[in-house]
Image: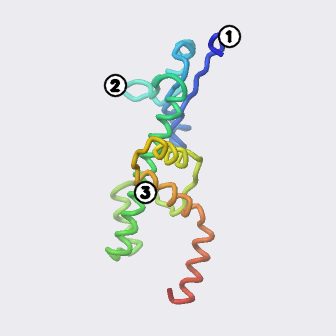
């Protein structure tokens, strides 16, 4: 398509709710020429970091911007998995009460933790890509499994009721 004068530019966009309010992080991939045509606009859209500038960069050819976004999400999901496992250890092994857990997590982060998360598909793509490249990524690979299960909140509540009634 480039021979016909059509240039491709893909973009990984990161930031979620905070990005919607304060500006996202943009990871561009595809034609560098296409990037140069709209660079001045792209420098105004993302979050602006004092002393660092806008959160935007050209990554490289093809779908590299989306690939970097996918890997970045993998790291974030791994972090969230570690937080969930820390909660489980503190609750089950440390025998902390909900009030004590709330206090610990408040010290770690001022946000509330909900035991349910969603999926957009990048978790699956990360695991597939790691497998295709023969790269072991156990923390990243386990996080989509936990996210799949966490999304089944109603089923988990129902199962807890069944287990409680049977004494398990």
Query: In the image, what residue occupies the spot 49% across and 21% down?
Result: 43
Label 1, label 2: how many angstroms apart (C-alpha)?
41 Å
The x, y position of residue 141, in whole percent, is: 46, 53
Looking at marks 3 and 2 on the same chain, the residue that comes earlier in the sequence is marked by: 2
Label 2 packing within 10 angstroms: few (<14), some (14-19), many (20+): few
Query: On the image, numbered disc 3 is attached to which residue?
Result: 81
Quadrant where the N terminus sits is: top right
Q: Of residues 155 and 24, which is closer to you in this image?
A: 155
Disc 1: which residue: 4
Frontmost residue, 34 versus 87? 34
Q: Secondary structure at mark 1?
A: helix
At which x and y percent is residue 85?
Answer: 39, 63
- In the rendered image, which quarter is residue 142 located in? bottom left
Query: Residue 166 versus residue 104: which sits nearer the camera?
Result: 166
SS for dot 3: helix
Image spot of residue 69 (x, y percent): 49, 36
Label 3 neighbourhood size at 10 Å, few (<14), some (14-19), many (20+)? Answer: many
Q: Quadrant of residue 52?
A: top left
SS of the residue at dot 2?
loop
Q: Which residue is mark 2?
A: 51
Vertical position of residue 17 compared to residue 141: above or below: above
């Amino acid at each position: 398509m480039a021979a016909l004068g059509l240039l491709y530019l893909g973009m990984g966009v990161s930031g979620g709710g905070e990005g919607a309010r304060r500006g996202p992080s943009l990871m561009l991939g595809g034609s560098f020429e296409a990037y140069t045509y709209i660079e001045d606009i792209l420098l105004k859209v993302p979050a602006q970091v004092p002393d660092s500038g806008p959160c935007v960069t050209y990554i490289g050819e093809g779908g590299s911007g989306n690939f970097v976004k996918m890997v970045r999400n993998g790291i974030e999901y791994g972090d969230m998995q570690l937080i969930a496992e820390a909660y489980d250890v503190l609750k089950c092994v440390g025998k902390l009460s909900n009030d004590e857990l709330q206090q610990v997590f408040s010290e770690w982060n001022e946000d509330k933790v909900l035991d349910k998360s969603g999926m957009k598909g990048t978790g699956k793509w990360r695991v597939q890509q790691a497998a295709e490249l023969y790269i072991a990524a156990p923390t990243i690979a386990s996080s989509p499994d936990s996210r799949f299960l966490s999304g089944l909140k109603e089923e988990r509540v129902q199962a807890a009721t069944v287990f409680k009634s049977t004494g398990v």
